Image (tube, rainbow, N blue to C red):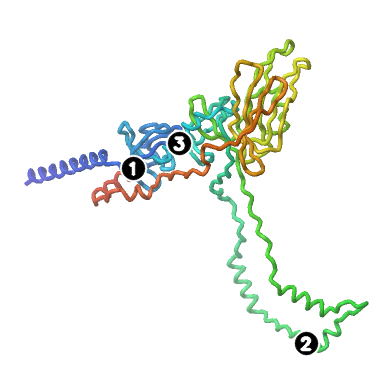
Amino acid sequence: MHRSLVGLATFYAFAVILLIALTSCTTQSSSAIGEAYIAPASINLRHELTQKNSTVAVLKHGDRVSILDVRRRFVKVRTANAVEGWIDSSQLLSPEQMNQIRRATREALALPSEGSATVFEALNVHIEPNRQSAALARIPDGGSVAVLGHKVEPKSAGPAPTSAFSFERPQPSIHRQHRDRRSKSIYHLPARPPAPRAPDNWQELSAERIDGSTSTADKRAALQRQMEKPANKPQELKKPVVVEDWSLVRTKGNQIGWVLTRNLIMSIPDDVAQYAEGKRITSYFDLGAVHDEVKGTKHNWLWTTSSGTVPYDFDAWRMFLWNRRRHRYETSYRQHDLEGYFPVHVDPPGSNAFVRTFQLITKDDDGRLWRGNYSFDGVRVHLAGREEYHAGISANASKPGTLNISQLQAKLPEQGWFRRHWNALKRAVGAKN
């Protein structure tokens, strides 16, 4: 009898171990319910959703993963190396988003540089001109990037911080409530007598007809009629939208992304930047070297500037030339109070190295874009001609959809009784450890 019980217990133990192994194999070989791509520059893949858990892999931006399970806003993924773990769904991109990023990267790599910029502190490069978007790269302290474009977007506001102080009026204590109730029940004050009735000729008594003036009764009647008229409600003042300047940049590793413009310093020499007059330099170009026997080698410069946060790229441009006789920079040509757009294109030097040509795009009062062709002969700027310009990229392109967690949850197969309890047991054991 004892041997039969031992054999039966051994059989059940073996069956349980076999069932656990089969369950583990089924979990490891479960089919994917979707695919996604890693958004940030790097992120840790966790083994379980517990406070104390190990990192099973470090994933990079653009890595493709297969989605296996969904638990609220967290998803279980499998990498190309068959490593499985959990990650926050907000750190993932849908295939449509990844395709748009790749297409935008190819288009941005073909754009000309509007000048180099330097950062004094480490700066994140975001996928979109939004503070809440993922950072695909990080510019190191003192790093340099090429500026490609500019955009103005509303500032993304995060959740309002909860205050640690309570401004509610304190409730009276229980003893005070009893005391007030008791005082009201003891003292019984008599009611106020009714007000005396006005005389029948009160309007004549209140009349003040001095030098043909209107009586007080007429004034009150006119005021009553004015009050009965529907008052025109003033228009509600709309809260101004706070916007931010963003710049499209290209890193040394040919990564394309957006950074806050206020964190960039254009790398134009200080002896030229001092003439900015408080405006922001948006682009600059070298238009040839000039040899000075006293100051050494200097350069002629073309730059564009902006006076504030505007939806266009620049509102003024200026040409600087180096005067070898006076050993200083002087303005050869300038225009302001305009609406200009990138790209500003400077042609490479031709057979005549002293003559340089460049093009600028501006918008007229009718809303049409014009590209002006200019030439610089080392002293003066000449307008060679203008032609209407048509932008090649539409600004109203549809935005791809993000990763839909609800649709992924609908694709999950229904779990049986044993699987649900087994997963709950694993989560409980993991939480205790």
Tell me residue 180's x, y (percent): 63, 72
- What amino acid does circle 2 point to? Arg
Label 2 neighbourhood size at 10 Å, few (<14), some (14-19), many (20+)? few
Label 3 vs label 1: CA separation? 19 Å
Which residue appears at 49% of the width and 37% of the height? 127
- Read off the residue under disc 2: 197
Using the image, determine if residue 78 lies above or below residue 202.
above
Task: Count residues near mark 1 (Cα–Cα under 10 Å), then give few for <14, some for 14-19, many for 20+.
Answer: some
Q: Amino acid at mark 3?
A: Ile
Label placed on residue 34:
1
Q: Can the viewer see residue 276 in this picture?
A: yes
Task: Identify which residue is drawn at 62% across, 46% down.
Answer: 242
Q: What secondary structure is found at the residue carrying circle 2?
A: loop
Of 59 and 308, nearer the camera is 308
C-alpha separation, residue under disc 1 versus residue under disc 2:
85 Å
Mark 1: which amino acid? Gly
x and y percentages locating residue 356 in the rendered image: 64, 21
Q: To which quarter of the image does residue 271 belong?
A: top right
Residue on which the image places disc 3: 101
